[in-house]
Image: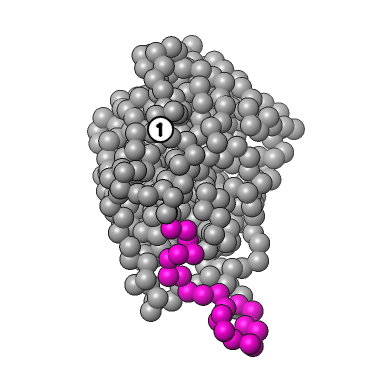
């Protein structure tokens, strides 16, 4: 949801049922002491199916053209339409949202009004806003641990983010005072981390969602399945744990056509609505062009804020796609951490829009863990992580 990866030629990397058993690895790392970071396996050290026969003198035939599923084709279509609309937003007039039940304009109370309009430090063309109540929620936090971590839009590549978060929590990079931010799937992982649940439990919930979509279909019904899973999985006080800590990015279509960062939540349902809105690919998550969130017409946050900034003085950005191939700058953790990446952006995009088999979901989790471990080798926790008792900063720099 919200993924905007390029679509290069189809990779020859395919997995047959007979090969699936090769990927049933189980990682039980407790800390970096259990992992020799100098000997971490790259993707080529796993037993992936070879792309060509090493000793054959006959050139291998080109891979057959891949057929897109209905869900992938639908997701790509609506992502393309939505991104074009967003790219033309600068020429769109500002519109006040009208109350359909009266002729009067909706009036927001003082704390609902926009209190900050900022340009992103890395992408100067990206504008984001915050309401007064969100700013106050952040400033009420007495201790802020830097760096914060921002998780990209990733769709159903969600297990990759879970693997990254699993490593960061185990090894002291993410604490209860660490600010988090995310778009789409990235917003979901932030809520999961703040809830106190384990990442292994979240992976099991992801498999339940994937199995439901494989049986009943993904396009037009993923939103209902997602809501149900979040309602059952998240604790009743998740909104309290997330207030002032978790920034959820949504894209406003009316009032102001810009990204909105939300981190003040009135209830569990309010938080779920924010996460749902952040994941709303028009016409794909549900059969409608947009969704209402706090009297604003909104869609997927990843379309304007692919990796939103956190409230910490520094932000490490986590991307589930190979950042270099997408032309993204300032990314801390991504598949680029292990350059021998066996999956093409096209394959990743397919998995982002259509749930992969459980064995692939397990592998994505493992890759996220290993990529975070490689990043940690260059960013030791004792030198990087610091507690700050001052008010959260609005400016953000990137830790690489």
Q: Is residue 2 visible?
A: yes
Q: Quadrant of the C terminus?
A: top right
User: Where 322 falls versus 183 (above or below)?
Assistant: below
Mark 1 = which residue?
Answer: 381
Magenta span includes 48: yes
Residue 398: percent from left, percent from top: 56, 31
Residue 253: percent from left, percent from top: 60, 34
Residue at 61% x, 68% y is: 10
Residue 184: percent from left, percent from top: 48, 42
Magenta span includes 213: no
Query: Which of the 4 image quadrants contains residue 30?
Result: top left
Q: Helix, strand, or loop for circle 1?
A: helix
User: Where 248 falls versus 82 (above or below)?
Assistant: above
Structural crowding at the residue carrying mark 1, measured as other residues with C-alpha within 10 Å and reported as few (<14), some (14–19) or many (≥20): some
Residue 162: percent from left, percent from top: 38, 46
Left/right of residue 389 with respect to residue 132 in the rendered view:
left
Q: Which residues are magenta?
A: 40-63
Query: Which of the 4 image quadrants contains residue 144?
Result: top left
């Amino acid at each position: 949801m919200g993924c905007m990866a390029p679509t290069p030629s189809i990779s020859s990397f395919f997995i047959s049922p007979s090969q699936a058993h090769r990927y049933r690895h189980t990682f039980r790392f407790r800390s970096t002491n259990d992992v020799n970071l100098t000997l971490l396996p790259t993707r080529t050290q796993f037993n992936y199916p070879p792309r060509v026969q090493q000793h054959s003198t006959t050139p291998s035939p080109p891979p057959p053209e891949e057929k897109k599923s209905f869900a992938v084709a639908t997701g790509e279509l609506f992502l393309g339409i939505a991104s074009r609309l967003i790219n033309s937003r600068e020429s769109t007039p500002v519109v006040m949202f009208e109350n359909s039940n009266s002729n009067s304009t909706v009036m927001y109370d003082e704390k609902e009004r926009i209190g900050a309009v900022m340009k992103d430090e890395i992408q100067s063309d990206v504008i984001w806003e915050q309401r007064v109540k969100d700013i106050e929620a952040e400033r009420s936090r007495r201790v802020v641990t830097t760096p914060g971590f921002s998780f990209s839009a990733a769709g159903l590549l969600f297990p990759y983010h879970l693997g990254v978060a699993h490593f960061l929590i185990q090894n002291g990079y993410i604490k209860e005072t660490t600010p988090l931010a995310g778009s789409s799937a990235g917003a979901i992982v932030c809520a999961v981390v703040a809830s106190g649940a384990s990442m292994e439990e979240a992976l099991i919930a992801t498999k339940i969602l994937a199995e439901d979509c494989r049986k009943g279909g993904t396009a037009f019904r993923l939103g209902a399945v997602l809501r149900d899973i979040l309602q059952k999985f998240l604790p009743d006080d998740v909104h309290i744990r997330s207030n002032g800590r978790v920034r959820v990015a949504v894209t406003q279509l009316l009032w102001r056509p810009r990204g909105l960062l939300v981190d003040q939540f009135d209830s569990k349902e309010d938080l779920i609505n924010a996460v749902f809105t952040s994941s709303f690919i028009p016409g794909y998550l549900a059969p409608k062009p947009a969704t209402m969130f706090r009297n604003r017409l909104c869609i997927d946050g990843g379309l304007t804020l692919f990796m939103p900034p956190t409230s910490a003085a520094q932000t490490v950005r986590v991307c589930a796609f190979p950042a270099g191939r997408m032309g993204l700058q300032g990314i801390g953790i991504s598949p680029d951490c292990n350059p021998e990446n066996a999956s093409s952006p096209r394959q990743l995009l397919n998995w982002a829009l259509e749930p992969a088999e459980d064995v692939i979901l397990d592998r994505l989790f493992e890759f996220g863990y290993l990529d975070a471990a490689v990043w940690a080798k260059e960013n030791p926790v004792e030198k990087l992580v610091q507690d700050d008792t001052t008010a959260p900063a609005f400016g953000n720099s990137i830790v690489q």
